[in-house]
Amino acid sequence: MTLSGIGPANRDTRSEGIRLRTLILLRWMAIAGQLAALTVADLVVGMQLPLGFCYLVVGVAVIGNLVASFVFPGNKRLSEAGAMLTLLFDVSQLAVLLALTGGLNNPFALLILVPVTISAGALELRTTILLGLVAIALVSIVWVYNLPLRFADGSVLQVPAVFEYGFWLSIVIGIMFLALYSRRVATEIRSMSDALLATQMALAREQKLTDLGGVVAAAAHELGTPLATIKLASTELAEELADRPDLREDAELIRAQADRCRDILRSMGRAGKDDLHLRQAPLGAVLREAAEPHLERGKSVAFDVFPGVTGSERQPTILRRPEVIHGLRNLVQNAVDFARAQVWIDATWTDAVISVRIIDDGAGYPASVLGRIGDPFVRSRTASQETGQRPDYEGMGLGLFIAKTLLERSGAQLSFANGADPFLTRAEHPNRSGAIVEVRWPASALVVRETDGLGHNRPLEV
């Protein structure tokens, strides 16, 4: 299954989520902090600062914020270049202010990490790298060229050189570490958000098809009587117009079109009647329904449904829930895509558990991702990879994530494994040597109780 527009396979749209108002608000907070620090240093601590130049640098930030607030709408979303220039301005403004107030002797030098961290969480990788390099370069320049901090008596505030070097090194390492950390976390959050959106879309589509089937079935049932009336009337007209060939042809055309409408509604309503009247079905029937779209794709699919040790001989009737059918269908698709020739679908039941295993004879899951299967975007593939196995498919772990999420929503637990030791030769592999997915439900989560049925009749309320 492919869902266009989901995931990072298409293009990076990180910066489209940054509102100008957000950066303006953050800058106002920085301006307030800078003014507070300058005021305390001057009036409370008694530092000799070049206040004119300092207030000029802060004023530039104030003017920039005012211009951005009045010229652009507050809900404007910045482009990648616009966001980068905004953060570069913030880094440069802070660096100039640090150069005027002691350089790395100023403990507020640590704040230069903030714009880089914002970029790592919201912008593209190349933008973050550029901003990080600029921040490191500015910190290095400020370390060497700065106006010293002086107390009221003229003495200079100077930390030992080794501490100053350590402070510079910690800022450089902090820029790199926080950038990588923030980007990693933001990427995982965004991937999970995209995958959950895709899951919701898949479930909504399955539910819509189920609901649509019920509507079609009802329409087919209700239209049956008027179509039969039209056919009967047109037949009688054709018989009465035997001496009028031109009109007889029109009557026969009406009858033929009524038959065509009946056939169309019958074919459309078949699945709808199933969904309308059979809200539950035997376990084997649900498995075949889930696998049906992939039974004619050139791979043999074998079904084996049998009771467990403590299970009754009668096959359990389970709920035909959209998330169960769609989740199993995704697992079957994955098995058929990677199988060489054969896929096995085994189902067993006991009084407490229903278990379904989907096995193929392919190469199995790569060892590098076996422990992370079920996470969205486990790995990315280029367009040329595996096109022979999965044409028109861009595999990024999203299908398995959707299947896992939907099935766990129904109360299932999933496990993934390989059927053969990777160190065995191909000749030593058993028949079922490929990927294995096992889905287990508590019987109470899926099995229809004997009293459930299709519902109960209720008396008419007058």
Image: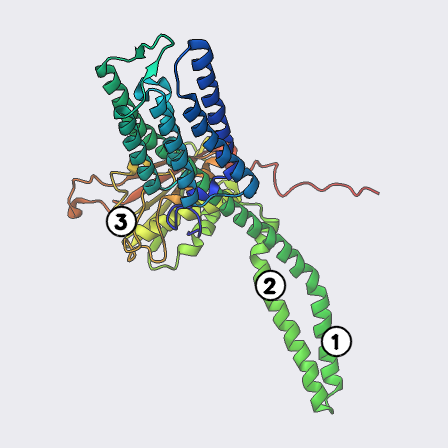
Q: Report the front residue among 372 and 146.
A: 146
- The answer to whether one can see residue 308 in this image is no
Q: Residues within 10 Å of mark 1 (few under 14, many from 20)?
A: some
Q: Look at mark 1 in the image and give the residue it sits on.
A: 233
Of the numbered discs 1 and 3, the one sitting upstream in the chain is 1
**Left or right of 430 on screen, residue 280:** right
Of the numbered discs 3 and 2, the one sitting upstream in the chain is 2
- Look at the picture and state if 102 lies above or below 46: below
* Residue type pointed to by label 3: Gly
Q: Position of residue 158 (x, y in %)?
A: 28, 13
Q: Look at mark 3 in the image and give the residue it sits on.
A: 362
User: What residue is drawn where x is 31% and y is 9%?
Assistant: 155
User: What residue is drawn where x is 57% and y is 50%?
Assistant: 208
Of the numbered discs 2 and 1, the one sitting upstream in the chain is 1
Q: Are marks 1 and 3 in contact (CB under 8 Å)?
A: no
User: What residue is drawn where x is 40% and y is 21%?
Assistant: 50
**Left or right of 272 on screen, residue 284:** left
User: What residue is drawn where x is 25% and y is 44%?
Assistant: 433
Q: Secondary structure at mark 1?
A: helix
- The answer to whether one can see residue 134 in this image is yes
- Look at the picture and state if 151 lies above or below 183: above
Q: Residues within 10 Å of mark 2 (few under 14, many from 20)?
A: some
* Residue type pointed to by label 2: Arg
Q: Look at mark 2 in the image and give the residue it sits on.
A: 266
Q: Residues within 10 Å of mark 3 (few under 14, many from 20)?
A: many
Q: Position of residue 321 (x, y in %)?
A: 53, 43
Q: CA distance from mark 1 to mark 3?
A: 60 Å
Q: Position of residue 225 (x, y in %)?
A: 72, 65
**Left or right of 238 on screen, residue 427:** left
